Image (cartoon, grey):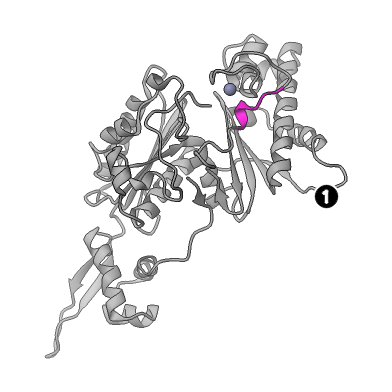
């Protein structure tokens, strides 16, 4: 379950789309411009014509020759849909075959709603937005969903608290037919940073999100790493000395128990981040102590992780970083204390540059690439999932997911 963070070489379909985005063309013109045979062009065009990305129109003729077909890119046809649902917000985008955003929505997650209800509301809002803008959703080829559940195959704790992939599929298919590619929100956010944000062109980095939980993942050698079972990068559940508090995961003393937003608020005796920020700005001893304790624990964990993968950067995301930008430098200083002093390290600690729409776009993007890859395997079909759920791994997917950061 890993994804490449650099675009692979464009397919012939991609090149046709790019060419037609500039101007309509005939088959002969495409063959010449793309230096390909009529047979290969015909195969690639068949897919694009079938999914509605390209349409053809007969040109009027004044002479005796056969009329020619002019191929036209349908710029308003939705090719892929991406959703990203977290405990605090829901985002959805619709992309054309060329990757242009045709519709987008961003909602605040209702506190009382279940994850499935949030997905449902996002689908509904996105479909309504598309209808208002008149985009064509008749031939959606791919759907990607980012949800705050881990994708590991051995996830077993608190199964009743989270929906299955099959349940998510039943919801999205009420709007769009393709079986969705489902992955973790933090992984999708990191993938977005790798492709379009703070990690662009960066071969290796660690992404850590400090929010309602602490979620992490790793990009190594231009791959968003999944590991053997899809659980690589669960840095929020490394044990730190600063705490012995119980964690939602079932352990005690995880990083999440000192560095998540709820942990910081509880330590400071406040109920939300606005109050926490006020207390820290007022130099309240308890609030500042909690933040310092979190920074030390985050720096320690990132230092250990940095020794493992030698990242070019750490990308920190989440409300805590937004509210306290100074944690970037403080975490960097603490992390460097963990690194080998005799070696040269060059690791920037930077903030994330994309929001929830970026993660939704990443979900759409992986689904779009998966849609043109292998058909579902028999094993995947047997457990009700699509091979698209695991495009770059042979690891079987889980049927239930556990409590997540
Ligand atoms: Zn934990």
Tell me which corner region of the image, top left, top right, bottom left or bottom right, holds residue 34. Answer: bottom left
Q: Find out whether residue 56 is within the magenta segment.
A: no
The answer to which of 137 and 187 lies nearer the viewer is 187
Helix, strand, or loop for circle 1? loop
Toward the top, the furthest residue is 269
Tell me: residue 79, above or below residue 317: below
Q: Can you tell me whether the CB of the residue at mark 1 lies under 8 Å from the nearest atom of ligand 1?
A: no
Other-residue count near label 1 (Cα within 10 Å), few / some / many at <14 / 14–19 / ≥20: few
The answer to which of 300 and 384 lies nearer the viewer is 384
Toward the right, the furthest residue is 342
Residue at the disc numbered 1:
344
Relative horizontal placement of residue 183, taking residue 327 as reference (left or right) = left
Tell me which corner region of the image, top left, top right, bottom left or bottom right, holds residue 341. Answer: top right
Rendered location of residue 312, percent (x, y)? 69, 49
| Quadrant of picture, ligand 1 | top right
Relative horizontal placement of residue 290, taking residue 129 as reference (left or right) = right
Q: Which residues are magenta?
A: 235-240
Tell me which corner region of the image, top left, top right, bottom left or bottom right, holds residue 61. Answer: bottom left
The answer to which of 118 and 246 lies nearer the viewer is 246
Relative horizontal placement of residue 267, taking residue 89 as reference (left or right) = right
Tell me: residue 332, above or below residue 178: above
Rendered location of residue 124, percent (x, y)? 28, 34
Please give the count of numbered marks on the rendered protein: 1
Which residue corresponds to the image point at 18% horizontal and 77% vertical from the top-left? Answer: 59
Would residue 282 be seen by someone viewing this image from the given angle? Answer: no
Rendered location of residue 374, percent (x, y)? 34, 55
The answer to which of 384 and 135 lies nearer the viewer is 384
Toward the bottom, the furthest residue is 64
Would residue 391 be seen by someone viewing this image from the given angle? Answer: yes
Which residue corresponds to the image point at 83% horizontal and 49% vertical from the top-left? Answer: 344
């Amino acid at each position: 379950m890993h994804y490449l963070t650099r675009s692979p070489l464009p397919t012939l379909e991609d090149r046709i789309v790019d060419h037609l985005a500039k101007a309509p063309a005939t088959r002969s013109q495409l063959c010449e411009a793309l230096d390909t045979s009529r047979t290969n062009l015909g195969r690639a065009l068949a897919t694009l014509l079938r999914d509605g990305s390209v349409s053809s129109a007969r040109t009027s003729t004044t002479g005796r020759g056969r009329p020619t077909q002019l191929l036209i890119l349908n710029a308003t046809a939705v090719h892929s849909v991406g959703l990203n649902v977290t405990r605090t917000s829901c985002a959805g985008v619709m992309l054309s075959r060329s990757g242009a955003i045709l519709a987008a929505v961003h909602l605040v997650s209702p506190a009382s709603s279940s994850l499935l209800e949030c997905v449902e509301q996002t689908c509904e809002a996105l479909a309504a937005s598309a209808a208002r803008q008149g985009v064509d959703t008749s031939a959606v080829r791919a759907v990607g969903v980012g949800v705050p559940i881990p994708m590991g195959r051995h996830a077993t704790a608190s199964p009743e608290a989270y929906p299955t992939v099959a349940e998510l599929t039943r919801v999205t298919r009420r709007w769009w037919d393709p079986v969705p590619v489902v992955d973790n929100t933090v992984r999708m956010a990191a993938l977005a940073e790798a492709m379009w944000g703070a990690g662009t062109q960066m071969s290796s980095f660690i992404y850590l999100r400090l929010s309602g939980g602490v979620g992490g993942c790793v990009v190594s050698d231009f791959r968003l790493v999944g590991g053997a079972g899809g659980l690589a990068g669960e840095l929020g559940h490394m044990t730190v000395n600063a705490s012995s508090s119980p964690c939602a995961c079932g352990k005690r003393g995880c990083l999440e128990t000192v560095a998540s937003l709820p942990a910081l608020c509880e330590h400071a005796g406040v109920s939300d981040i606005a109050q926490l920020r006020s207390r820290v700005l007022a130099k309240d001893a308890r609030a500042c102590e909690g933040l310092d304790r979190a920074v030390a624990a985050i720096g320690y964990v990132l230092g250990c992780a940095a020794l493992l993968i030698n990242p070019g950067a750490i990308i920190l995301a989440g409300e805590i970083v937004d509210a306290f930008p100074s944690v970037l430098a403080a975490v960097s200083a603490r992390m460097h204390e963990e690194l080998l002093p005799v070696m040269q390290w060059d690791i920037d600690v930077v903030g994330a540059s994309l929001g929830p729409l970026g993660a939704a776009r990443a979900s759409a993007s992986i689904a779009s690439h998966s849609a043109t890859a292998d058909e579902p395997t028999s094993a995947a079909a047997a457990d009700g999932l699509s091979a698209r759920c695991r495009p770059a791994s042979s690891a079987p997917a889980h049927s239930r997911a556990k409590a997540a950061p």
